[in-house]
Image: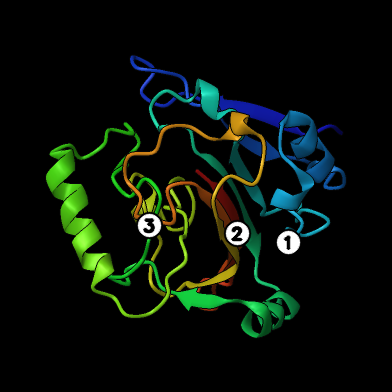
Amino acid sequence: MEGSFKIILVNASIAVVTLFFYSCNQSQGYKDRLVTSGAKMEFINHFPSHLNKQSSKLIFNLHPENNFVSDRIVTIYLEHPINDSVVSYCSKNSIATYHYQDSCNIIPFIFQKDLSFKRALDSERSYNDWLDQIEQCDQVRYPIPNFILVGDEDFANRNGISDDYNIYVLEAKGGIKYSSKYYGKINFMPEGWIHGHSKGVAISPEKQKMIYWFVLW
């Protein structure tokens, strides 16, 4: 059977955010469907070839020009049962490993707090405090996503995942590398990361769950 899509309305009085849930009885070909929907295969080349039909959940936003409430951000998440070979690969090949609550994390749209997607404005003060905080960090930091709508039930209505997830960054590059249609005006990012993309896998041995991710801003 073909996969089915559900459009999620986020604060419908403001806008419709193009987020989709993908559930399928036929797990093959989901990457091709994503590409048909607007993704590039480079965005998801670290994702698994097939979905787990019982327990995979795919969430994505590939049309940032229509996403008025999130300043044009591309996100792709895939929740999947843990796989030991993926854990081993990420441990050996990641360029960085973080936990979400690390104080030095660089997170595009950290000010999206909940399902209403309203930014925490007092923007200048919030942004400057955050920028001062990360600029005091002496290690190189790569951006990670805010994980809205994935991960734990406790975080379902706000950004973040619990710290039992190891967030493995497999690639992170600043600047505009793809078509301009994926990018928009960005207000809240430090110098060097005004635009960019990153991808990786967040893994929780405790929950026996992985979250494949790609984010572009």
The residue at the point 73 percent across, 30 percent down is 37
Query: Can you say whether 198 is above or below 94 in the image?
Result: above
Query: Can you say whether 123 is above or below 95 in the image?
Result: above
Whole-percent x, y for residue 35 in the image: 78, 37
Circle 3 sits on which residue? 160
Circle 1 sits on which residue? 46
Q: Where is residue 91, by image quadrant?
A: bottom right
The answer to whether any part of residue 55 appears in the image is yes
Residue placed most toward the observer, 114 or 130: 130
The answer to whether any part of residue 25 appears in the image is no
Q: Amino acid at mark 3?
A: Gly
Q: Amino acid at mark 1?
A: His
Label 1: how many residues lie within 10 Å, few (<14), some (14-19) or many (20+)? some
| Cα gap from disc 1 to disc 3, whole angstroms | 21 Å
Determine whether label 1 and label 3 are within 8 Å by CB.
no
The residue at the point 42 percent across, 52 percent down is 146
Query: Can you say whether 58 is above or below 88 in the image?
Result: above
Please state if 32 lies on the left or on the right of 60 as rendered: right
Please state if 194 lies on the left or on the right of 55 as rendered: left
The residue at the point 32 percent across, 68 percent down is 101
Determine whether label 1 and label 2 are within 8 Å by CB.
yes
The quadrant in which the N terminus is found is: top right
The mark closer to the camera, 1 or 3, is 1
Whole-percent x, y for residue 153 in the image: 40, 54
Q: What secondary structure is found at the residue carrying circle 1?
A: loop
Which numbered tag is attached to residue 199?
Answer: 2
Q: Where is residue 69, by image quadrant?
A: top left
| Cα gap from disc 1 to disc 2, whole angstroms | 8 Å
Q: What secondary structure is found at the residue carrying circle 2?
A: strand
| Cα gap from disc 2 to disc 3, whole angstroms | 16 Å
Q: Amino acid at mark 2?
A: Lys
Q: What secondary structure is found at the residue carrying circle 3?
A: loop
